[in-house]
Image (cartoon, rainbow, N blue to C red):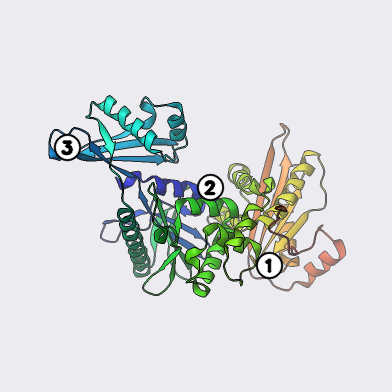
């Protein structure tokens, strides 16, 4: 039944959206040197020198009992409700007396409107009355005896949680050991491309995500982390809290930085974190008061955060990049991944600077204008960006290459990415990109050219921008 785990499917769905399919690995079965099938981690995120390993644990089993059992063997059973986030469907499985009925769509049952709407959300969490309605509908459809739900005790929920966290911790340790022993493992990412994955010189974050329909005891609900044998932190999140984090932080760069901040808190204020809400830890990160003692007062920071619509444009930019970008003349294997990787590292303030110049180039091309190219660079990424509008396809790759080299040199960056856009006769946009990655070296001829011709608008390096904006809460 593990193949149906809703939480695992949902976490993969979220990671695909926020970390992008290029850097998400959820199909992690492979054959080792002995041709034996192996699997590592429920989900893996790999972005440059950062790797995140996930273990997902879920309990969506409903214990049921028959009101008038024929014999003791048929006295109890299990109803398993799960969702498929990709297909946006919810299913049920019922098992008793060694028999089972599975993979039946909940929408096929005769149910009320409110239950149907919950099912369509593909995250089924039902009230007691709704569960009984589902049981009655299942009984009627499959000609089963009348059923009711068995109550779950607090101690039973605690045992499941502690057992699940311990199991997930051991699985993560086993996965890391396997990576270290085998050095390189070939895995297929969620775009369908195979890469050799290894932990060499990687910063590895470890995450356990749990999901349960039961109300957990406080000591379980407030658990934020556990430690492995090396005393390294393993983050523990409920599914809802992980969803909150990625929806608030939006960008891979900020999510990764939050994990780093969270580990800092674990080291400095381990005993205090039990009573601190996850939303408050998130608020402290956003506020910038990273050295303060944790406090639930930081919750208001998250609630006052202003979400800017233009920030979401990074997903649109990624779609443009994949659907409409033309390869540059550089013959670098998997070159598109190098560009995508730099885009995925941008924080929301950097995305705004990128979008502003990118859309200015599009607007200029639409007006048949060729203004002086806009540019900026980000020192922490050691990467520059330049944006130009051209009037026709002819020679624009050469033009873009020249401007990319100029911006790389002027910003003294190791890497530089150039984007060019022109409009075809039918009004459609064509985008071209160029990627450079090589050691910066002094070049007097290029220095003189830049000094005498001023080929760009905008400073070579991006100044500090305000990342988060807040509204007043009365």
> In the rendered image, which residue does mark 3 sit on?
74
Label 3: which secondary element: helix
Residue positioned 40% across, 59% down in the render: 220
> In the rendered image, which residue does mark 2 sit on?
17
Residue 141 higher or lower than 264, as above or below: above
Which numbered mark, 2 or 1, is in the foreground of this view?
A: 2
Label 1: which secondary element: loop
Q: CA distance from mark 2 to mark 1?
A: 27 Å
Q: In terms of sequence position, does the residue under pointer 2 or pointer 1 come before the other?
A: 2
Q: CA distance from mark 1 to mark 3?
A: 67 Å
> In the rendered image, which residue does mark 1 sit on?
379
Where residue 465 appears, as percent x and y from the top left, is 73, 61
Which numbered mark, 2 or 3, is in the foreground of this view?
A: 3
**Residue 279, quarter of picture:** bottom right
Report whether 400 appears left or right of 222: right
Q: In terms of sequence position, does the residue under pointer 2 or pointer 3 come before the other?
A: 2
Quarter of the image with the N terminus in it: top left
Q: In terms of sequence position, does the residue under pointer 1 or pointer 3 come before the other?
A: 3
Where residue 201 appears, as percent x and y from the top left, is 48, 71
Label 2: which secondary element: helix
**Number of numbered discs:** 3
Residue positioned 36% across, 27% down in the render: 108
Where residue 40 appears, as percent x and y from the top left, is 35, 58
């Amino acid at each position: 039944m593990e193949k149906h785990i809703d939480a695992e499917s949902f976490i993969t769905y979220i990671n695909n959206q926020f970390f992008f399919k290029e850097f998400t690995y959820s199909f992690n079965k492979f054959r080792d040197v002995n041709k034996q099938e192996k699997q590592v981690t429920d989900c893996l995120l790999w972005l440059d020198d950062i790797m995140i390993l996930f273990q997902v644990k879920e309990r969506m089993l409903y214990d049921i009992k028959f009101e008038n059992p024929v014999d003791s063997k048929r006295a109890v059973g299990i109803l398993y409700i799960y969702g498929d986030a990709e297909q946006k469907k919810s299913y049920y499985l019922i098992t008793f007396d060694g028999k089972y009925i599975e993979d039946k769509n909940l929408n096929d049952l005769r149910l009320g409107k409110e239950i149907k709407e919950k099912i369509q959300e593909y995250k089924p969490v039902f009230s007691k009355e709704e569960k009984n309605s589902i049981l009655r509908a299942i009984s009627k459809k499959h000609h089963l005896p009348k059923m009711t739900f068995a109550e779950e005790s607090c101690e039973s929920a605690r045992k499941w949680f502690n057992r699940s966290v311990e199991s997930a911790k051991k699985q993560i340790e086993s996965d890391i050991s396997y990576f270290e022993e085998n050095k390189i493992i070939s895995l297929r990412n969620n775009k369908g491309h195979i890469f050799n994955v290894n932990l060499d010189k990687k910063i590895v974050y470890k995450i356990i995500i749990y999901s349960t329909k039961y109300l957990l005891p406080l000591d379980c609900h407030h658990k934020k982390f556990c430690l492995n044998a090396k005393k390294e932190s393993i983050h523990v999140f409920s599914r809802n809290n992980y969803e909150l984090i990625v929806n608030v932080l939006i960008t891979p760069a900020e999510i990764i930085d939050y994990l780093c901040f969270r580990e800092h808190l674990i080291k400095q204020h381990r005993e205090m974190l039990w009573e601190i809400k996850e939303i408050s830890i998130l608020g402290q990160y956003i506020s910038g008061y990273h050295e303060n003692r944790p406090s639930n007062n930081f919750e208001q920071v998250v609630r006052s955060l202003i979400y800017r619509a233009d920030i979401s444009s990074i997903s649109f930019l990624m779609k443009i990049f994949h659907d409409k970008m033309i390869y540059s003349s550089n013959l670098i294997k998997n070159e598109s991944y190098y560009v995508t990787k730099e885009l995925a590292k941008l924080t929301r303030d950097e995305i705004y600077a990128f979008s502003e110049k990118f859309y200015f180039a599009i607007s200029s091309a639409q007006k048949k204008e060729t203004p002086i190219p806009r540019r900026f660079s980000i020192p922490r990424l050691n990467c520059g960006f330049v944006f130009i509008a051209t009037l026709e396809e002819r020679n624009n790759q050469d033009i873009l290459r020249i401007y990319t080299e100029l911006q790389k040199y002027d910003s003294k960056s190791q890497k530089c990415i150039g984007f060019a856009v022109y409009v075809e006769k039918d009004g459609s946009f064509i985008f071209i990109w160029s990627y450079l990655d090589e050691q910066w070296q002094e070049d007097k001829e290029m220095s003189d050219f830049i000094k005498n011709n001023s080929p760009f608008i905008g400073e070579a390096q991006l100044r500090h921008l305000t990342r988060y904006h807040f509204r007043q809460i009365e």
